[in-house]
Amino acid sequence: MAFIKIENLYKRFGNVAAVNHIWLEVNRGEILTLLGPSGCGKTTTLRCIAGLEKPDEGDVIIDGQSMFSQGFIPPSKREIGMVFQNYAVWPHMRVFDNVAYGLKIRKLPKKVIKKKVTETLESLGLTGLEGRFPGQLSGGQQQRVALARALVGNPKVLLLDEPLSNLDAKLREKMRFEIKSLVRRMGITSVYVTHDQAEAMVISDRVSIMNAGDIVQVGTPEEIYKKPANRFVADFIGTTNFIAGEISEVLRERELVSIHTEFGQKMLCKIPDPAMASTNKKVTISIRPEDIEVFKEPREGADNLFKGTIVNRAYLGNFLYLFVSVDHTMVRVQAPYGIKQKEGEELFLFLNPEKCIVLP
Amino acid sequence: MRRIVILLSGFLLLLPLLVVQVEAAEKVGWVGPIYKELSDSLMKGFKDYYKKTYNKDIEITFVRPGGWPVCVDKVRAWRGRPDADVFLGAGAPAFEVLEKGGFIVPYKPKDWDKIPAKWGGMKVKDERLMWTCFSPWIVTNLYNEKVLKSLRLPPPKTWKDLLNPIYRDLIVQTLPYASGTQHEAIEIHLQTFGEKEGWAYNRLLAAQLARFSTGSTDTTQLVARGEVPIGVAQPQMNAMSARADGYPVKDLLPDKTILVPEAVGLLKNAPNEANGKIFLDWLFSMEGQKYVLEGRYFPARTDVKFSVWGKEGVAMAKHAQDALGVDSFWDLKVGFINYDLELATKRWDEVNRYYEAEIYRKLRELKSSLFLIEEVEGEVEVAKKKGVDVSKAEAKIKEARRLFEFDGAYATARLTASEARALLVAASR
Amino acid sequence: MSRGNLFLSLLLWLILAIFVIYPLSFLVIESFKIAGTNDVGIQNYIDFFKDTYYLKTFGNTLLLALLVLLTSTAFGLPLAYILARYRLKGKTVLTALILLPIVLPAYAGAFAFMVFFGKQGTLNLLLLELGLVSKPVNFIFGLHGLVFIQALHLLPFIVLSLSAGFTNIDPSLEEAAEVEGAGGFKRFITVTLPLCTPNYLAGAVIVFLWPFTDWLTPMIFGQIDYLPSISYINIAYHFTDMYRKYMGIVSVVVSSVICIGMFLISKRWVESKKYTSLSKGTTLEGRIIEPGPIKRFWSYVYMFLIAVLVLLIPTVLGLSAFSRRWVLTPIPTYWTLDNFRLIFLESPGLLKNSFVFSGVSLLWGVAFGLPAAYLITRTRVRGKEALDFVITLMLAFPGIAVGVSYLLAFWEGIPLATHWIIMPLSLFVRRLPYFLRMAHASYLQLDVSLEEASEISGAGKLKTFMNISLPLLLKGVFVGIVMFFIMAFQEISTAIFLYRGGWETLPIGIFLNWHRGMEFGIAAAMAFFMIVIIFILLLIVSRIGGGIIGAAWGSSGGRY
């Protein structure tokens, strides 16, 4: 059930369309991440949901209520919570007052405010810091204050604008799970903006990938990883190998295509979409390093088996990471620890047709 | 909270509008360039008089936005709805302008007859009653006794004395448009020496100056402080005032000068006309005139004797007697010129403009030209004594001086002077 | 563009239209009038640009402005750094001291320097007596003296704005440079200074424009060939010569246009380097360093030297205040309390006027300046640049021009000039840019997300402003308020045109008493009195806020 609907949203800064007529739905209670490189329009989209920016066209509908088209609803009336990248905790207010601010604005009774703030602070492990000024807190603590402030009023929607980017790696990892479980528990519909794909994978129910003002693909983290819609998504999410080629033959009965690749050899791949299967079409094959199998010896009659030379061999603890040159094309391979070949030695790569993704 | 803030700030913003000025029953307003000393003295005297006579307090407002041209401009800015009743101070030219603009109306103060009609060829009161002099003074110069003594220089007696090289860089004056007195001084030069010679004189005087001051009071202060020992074009009472304060300053009555009748007039549409008239009557009474003197201005009535006043306890009477050397202002013996007021008024702006354009703005050029001429003249003199035939060079350098003094052609004069030097060199060979 | 912003903007425009555009248009119209006729045309302007004399005065003024800016920066930079960064005892008092010159009307300071540095001044008399010189040395008459006195007068603007900059820099930015291997001085040049540019320019513009509007100081030093002085003389002393008056107004208009042009360039430059650091709002008091003994020593020496120069003004004024006929002797010979007796008879009224006028204008200034700064920095309301432009226009207009145009505009028609309200009004209009600049600069440094967070929390624009922006801006705004007040307190060139009997302020009192015979003592006593009042005010403020800079920039230990 769509709780937030973004309809045909368009926002221009100068001559650049920051958000280019996008459509998006966020379901009740889910965490949706807007993921993309900087400048892709994800923060602008978030700020339109918050009402901090006004779109040039289109509308945002939250819980069935239009935010723009039937008169502008200011941020203060949207019942949202937001966590800013730089926390934006007010330096002149104590922790308690920072968190209580929204409740005081709503003129709740003092007792209720006290109770709610104390509870929220407790759930974020900030008990005892109520009387401090933000300047006396660590970055992580300020982050939690910002989060507490956003959550204390039980908002309809929680918006998070790269909330973890200013934290150190360890803390960041910890906070990912913490935010996720907290938001889950409270069941708040959340939109999370980040440029960190690992963070997006961990935290989201669904991910919406944006590029240059457009939404490129929406799906669960698994869908996005396994079935990237195009080269941009495949590249942005995780690591992959791209092999350029041209479809030379369509083997309909096996649901395969034969592709003439830049290796100068033919390669069989599963067709994701029958519409794409036409001969002479230029395509890109994407295959993840962990999907490539490695053999020491050639195997007679096997398809998609290529000979290559190890250029670089790195030990990453539980597996090996190899850079293999196949006819001058560099292929990244994640190999089991048992491979003994040294740099400069030869081996054979098997690119399983089932796992080769053909991208337009 | 919010409501309180809004109410409070609204109140604060509007506060000034709520304050109602307490209106005094009786008022009178003066505008004019008189010094603070005089305005203070007159305020005190007139308030006492008003209380004594009408058994009522009077509130006096006095506005002095600057020198008298500024005051005239102020009246003009009021555009016939004056914020004062009386224009107090300034000489005849100011009142001519005020009359032309229709800003003043005639009034005959009670003791009008006690003021002379003319003195030294100058009108002291207007027969059409537009203005009447309440305090006369003479355009004088000023020097610092102590500094001149330390420089072992005699005080200059005449206008021509000021051109003596011994006073070079020891004289200060202001620009004619910054001070009416300075303007009058130049007018004196023009009318005494003749127009051409008058300008020649001013060119030569400009080369003597240490600097220009910003106004006649500035000149007085520079001299009193000793920064520059001689000041040109001063109201006569400035020296008296400074001396009364203990400064080693004396006025120099030049050989030729004029009277400036510091006058008063009633403004048209005066808001408190009746009180304005009462003030004018009082100003010319014996009592009012005493307050004029205590305000360090000379009294204008013919029947004033400083010696008598001194005995009556008028503190400034002694200083006035010292400064003037006589018992009444009108006893002064002064070398007056036949001042052509009409001509002076007509060319007022023209004189100022000419001075500014031809002397002030070209001062650097003027000095370099004159100094070269003087140098070459010296060389000619030396050569003459050596028996060299200098007739050609002498003629040339005379031409240069003429070009400098009468034509104000500084560049050509300079060129001619160098030609004279070349001729001299040729003759010496 | 929300309706509220639009409404606010219209309101501000209305106020500007009545109190800036309407009166100034009179002035512009005046500049096109042709003397002796009823015609209008550009003849005056053609004459102006053809006349080499006006070009010369313009060149002089430009040179003066540059030299003043360079000098005050050269002296102000180390001072600002010391005040902002070093932990030193007595900083509060020294800070209050360096604020002194702007408290005084420029001419009172100029006169004090004349008494001390003049040809027959204390210094020369002493040197002559000691036989160190045989002829009086010309210390101050001329360009060098003018640069000296104006640079000292304007030093506080540079010091305040620079030390605000130094305090506001995120320490990590400097530490980053340190890590990169930039040594002390290099780091200062490459990181610290560039980061301060926006703050510096806010002060530098005021300093640079000052010589274009100060007519009196050059005149006191016998230098008339500067644009504002010549404008003043032309306007004030034109008498019947309307041509002269129009030329004066033309030069006012021209110099205003030039000033505005220069202001716009600097503004564009500032905005092109808007460094809002991400962690803004969380930094506290910047880097405060415990200086080593050598640095500490030289810092004290330096501050002491500046303080001596600054203190010379109140000292000389004080000596004059307690004496009479002090000339031709190094120190006064005749001591008296007469001057004070005289001023206490007339000063209570002047003092009351000064406080009421400055106070009322300050209220208006804040009520107008903060919303204006908000509109300019925080919204996309159409015409906000123009708003900024028009307000700043006043910075470039000499006081005399404001005085003249106010009289032209508000005597008939809208007869405001008959009510004393005209006094605070003119002060408000003249000093508004100073406040707006400070509020603007503080707004630029206030991270917008702090305000957005409040709106998200359910607070409307007004509440957000009251609860979040205002308290956080207060540091910068406070300095703006102090500056506004003292600038209003010492204003004279407009007031002298507008005052009526009974509306005299303390500076007008000083000016009038200056013309009281030869006796400078009374004027000096008033000026001295004024310094004492302001200094006490500053000390009270600094006591409450824990140091001027501390109060202004919120460095007081535990609070933030």
Image: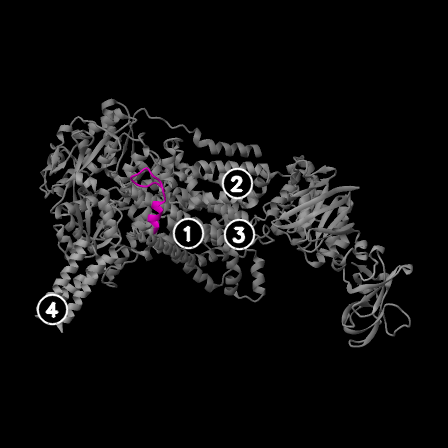
Reading the image, the residue beneath label 2 is C371
Q: CA distance from mark 1 to mark 3?
A: 19 Å
Label drawn at residue C207: 1
Q: Mark 1: which secondary structure?
A: helix
Disc number lying in front (3 or 4): 4
**Percent from the top left, x then y, of residue B366?**
22, 57
Q: Mark 3: which secondary structure?
A: helix
**Percent from the top left, x then y, of residue C311?**
36, 52
B138 left or right of A203? left
Q: Chain of mark 3?
A: C
C405 left or right of B320? right
Three-letter code, disc 2: Pro
Three-letter code, disc 4: Ala
- Residue B146, visible in the rendered structure: yes
Disc number lying in front (4 or 1): 4
Label drawn at residue C271: 3
Disc number lying in front (2 or 3): 3
Whether the residues at callouts 1 and 3 have beta carbons within 8 Å, the answer is no
Marks 2 & 4 on one chain: no
Whether the residues at callouts 4 and 1 have beta carbons within 8 Å, the answer is no
Task: Specify which label sits upstream in the sequence, 1 or 2.
Answer: 1
Reading the image, the residue beneath label 4 is B383
Q: Chain of mark 1?
A: C
Label drawn at residue B93: none
The quadrant of the image that shows the N terminus of chain C is: top right
Residue nearer the viewer, C379 or B10: C379
| Magenta-span inclusion, residue C44 | yes
- The residue segment tinted magenta is C32-49
Q: Chain of mark 4?
A: B
Label 3 crowd bin: few (<14), some (14–19), many (20+), radius 10 Å: few
Residue nearer the viewer, C385 or A131: C385
**Percent from the top left, x then y, of residue A170?**
72, 58
